[in-house]
Structures are given as C-alpha cells and as structure tokens.
Amino acid sequence: MILSRYNLKNIHSAGLDVPDEKLFDLPEKVLQFGTGILLRGLPDYFIDKANRNGIFNGRIVVIKSTNTGDSAAFDKQDGLYTLCVRGLENGEKKQENIINSSISRVLSASSQWEQILDCAHNMHMKVIISNTTEVGIQLVHEDIRKHPPVSFPGKLLAFLYARYNAFAGSQESGMVIVPTELIVDNGKKLESIVLELAHLNGLEDGFIQWLEGSNHFCSSLVDRIVPGRPDRAMQTTLQSELGYEDNLLIISEVYRLWAIEGGEEVKKVLSFAQADSGVVIEPEIELHRELKLRLLNGTHTLSCGLCFLAGSTTVRDAMEDESLSSFIADLMQNEIAPSIPYPIAPQLAKDFCVKVLDRFRNPQIQHQWSAITTQYSSKMKMRILPVLLKHYEQYEHAPELIVLGFAAYLYFMKAVKNDDGKFYGELNGKEYLINDDMAELFMNRWKKHPSELVQEVMRDNDFWGADLHALPGFSNAVLEKLNMIIEKGAKGSVEFVQSKKVFA
C-alpha cells in the first residue's frame, strides 16, 4: 500500500501522526522554491505542526526549479511524506513518526511556469521560502520575462512582479521572503540581487517602491540534521512498522532551529512560529549564528582531524570513546564557549552545549569525520581564528585543547601523494583524501622540519589575516603538540592530555 490521501483511512499504525482530512482543504499560503530534504525536514515540519494545531492554517506550493529528477513521487503520494524523528533530547531517547500534509502540490518551473505565476494572484499567498543551495543566490544578468527565468532570483523577481500587477501594487499584497541557504545575511543578499535585477530589467519605479516598501526579505539560519532517505535495510524496517510504502520518507534528528530576522509584522504573517519553540523570530539573529558556528561547527572543526587520526570514523563513534568524548566536551564547554566573540550569557552557552552533545550522541546520525575535514583550512580560519583571538584577549595564554586540535589539523594536512591534482595523506598504511584548496601548499610545507612548518603556518598573514606567531606561546605550544602526535599518535596524545586536564 502506497502512502496517499486515499489510503490514509487504511493506515492505523500505533504512534503514527496521521493528518485529519480537513487539513487538505486549507488554502495555499506558501510558495517554496526547492523540494529538498532540509526544507521538508524543517520549515515544512513547522508549518505542518502549526496546521495540526489550528494556528497557521495554510499549505505549501512547492516549486521544482531544476531539471534533475521529477515530481512523480509527490504526485503519486498527493504531496504526503513521512518524517521519522529520531534522537536524544535532554539525554533521553525520543522518536516521532509524522505523515506531513503541508505540501499542496509540486509544480515544475520548466514546464508549469504559468501555473506558478497564477499563484501570484492568490491573496492568501503571503510567504516565500527557498533553499536553492548557496550557488542559487547569485546575480545572473537575464530577462525575467523568460518562461521561466534561469536563476532563482530571476524567478522570484518575475513572481513578485506578477503579484505587483495582480494587486495593483497594494501594500497588503507584499510577501514575507525567507531564504534558508547557508549564507550569512542571506535575506539581505537576496534582496540586493533582486533589486539590482529589477533595475537591469528596467522595471518601473512604482514596482521598485513596492518591492522595497511592502515586502520583507528576512535573513534566517536553519539548523537540523536531515540525512534524508534511510538506507535500504532501515527503509524496509520502517515501512514494515508503519504499514505502507513511502518513497519520500526521510529521517531527522530531534533538535530543530529556524531563526528568522524580523519584527512584529513578520511574526504576524509567520504565525506557525507559535506552534514550536524551534522557530525564533527576532530583530537580530547573530546570537543564534554564533552559538551554532562556534559550539557546533567549531567543535567539529577542531575535533575532526584529531578524531580521524585517532581511528574514529564518525562523530557518534567518538562519543562512545571515553578519551575522545571527554576531549570534545571539554573543548566545547571550557575553551570555545568562554571565548565566543559575541556577548552570550554563560548559562545560554551551557544549555546549548548540552543540546549539541546530545546531537553528537545520536545513534541515527552517521556523520563522517572525513566529510567534516573538507576545506579544513578555510573552516579553521572562519570558525576557530575568532575564538582563538578572543581567548588571547581574555587570558593571554595558549588554550591547550584548541592547540591540540590545531596541531592535529597540521598533521592531517601532511599530503604524501599527488594524484593528478588530488592530494592524499596516509594513516596506518591507508591513504585518505585531503579535500582542501591548500593541500598542495601543505605538501610542500611538510618537506621541511616540523618547527619550520609551524613557523611558516603561523606567519602566513595573507591567509589568516593575522600573525599567529605573535600570540604568546601559541607557536611553541602547537609545535609541542604536533611532536606529541608524531611520537604518541593522535589517540595517545588525547589520552595523555585528558589524563592531566583539570578544569575549574
């Protein structure tokens, strides 16, 4: 039995949230660019939850922007899909199985553009959401009168122009536009591109004024791990338990956050926020960005090379190892948290750390350390350097665990093979890929003595934008830990450091 609206009456699995028939009659209020798993696992989850609670009362028209794949699965299942939530919350296991009914229909931009533009005439339509990848928010010089325009900003502008004309530029016809692409200030960047594209297309001043004055482009931050469709074995198990076939089934962790920049007008339109504390609408969301960037992403970055070199494959593996899990927790809570370069209440940082550690322990999420090392150097610069500099502002001594993570980064970057532009390191006789734009530079650096290597890295002002050698004791501390890794191995180094580490 395939999941569909017709078959809902035949689904009676225990612990499964099945949508009420009345939800299918709700008006379409949201235009969503993207069919991806992140959108279905986070924004669509919130909207569906609100609908069930009689709060938002609106469904989503999903726009399939690319030519890859098709929407047949959505059509066959009437837009329904199952979200299986698995993980830990406050240290306790939690799971939910939800049939999401928030999607009304899926339209293809390439073949159904006129139907998409028809949505601009729907007064109930008040929200636009997107996740077109970071590459999607780019300025493409194009005629937005094409059917359809090539770029996402072009498609968005064409829709907004159609809406302006449909309602004669009325104030109340404006939209709340919330991009979720992983770009800082994504809303502001999208707005600037749309405005520039409007000028390039010679659109009238009245439209420009409406675009700027009646619409809200809201920057946002999304945070939820949604690995996607489970492997074949888990898919079979879940479908057996649920009692139906679902080709759109996805899994997510319990933790969820959608931080949106906006004021009272935005809150009024995005009323689904009332249904779940995971939606945060505030005039400023930098706090949420810093917490995620430093405590989650920063901990990942400083741990990935060390844990990989210590023989750990996934984040979950490391959390089951006493010395590695101790290192990760101490690093996050006692060195990164106090040095976040943004004013954050200590209790707020502490609470966030607890949630992150729960996420790291999630048995359903197989996050590979090797994947986290991708573009290792740029991540160290963006995520770790500001924390390191802030630490020195406060304490003026080398932070031992950050130092060990930095030393492991240097050792991981020791390429021993260049295979047609792909660089490989070696661990226990096996090669591993160094997927980093600076891999070739590090291969040359490692031809020198470790002391020279460390000095060269520390004095690379062009890359770091700072002289790390000027930080008191940092170069010597990194060299000491690098030699320790060379002599004792990564695992032995972690065990040694953690055995003598005492935090106040």
Image (cartoon, helix red, strand yellow):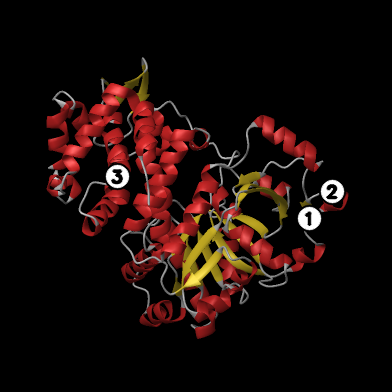
Numbered badge on residue 4: none
> Which residue is under mark 2?
11
Residue 479 horizontal side relative to residue 372, left or right: left
Dot 1: few (<14), some (14–19), or many (≥20) neighbours within 10 Å?
Answer: some
Which residue type does callout 3 highlight? Met
Residue at image x 58%, y 56%? Answer: 42
Left of 71 or right of it: where is 496?
left
**Callout 2 amino acid:** Ile
Question: Total number of numbered labels?
Answer: 3
Q: Residue 312, percent across and down? A: 45, 29
Quadrant containing the N terminus is top right
Instruction: Classify mark 1: helix, strand or loop.
Output: loop
Q: Residue at x 46, y 80 (%)?
A: 214
**What residue is disc 1 on?**
18
Residue 380 has which mark? Answer: 3
Q: Position of residue 474 (x, y in %)?
A: 19, 43
Residue 227 falls in image quadrant: top right
User: Can residue 36 be seen here?
Assistant: no
Which of 363/357 is in front? 357
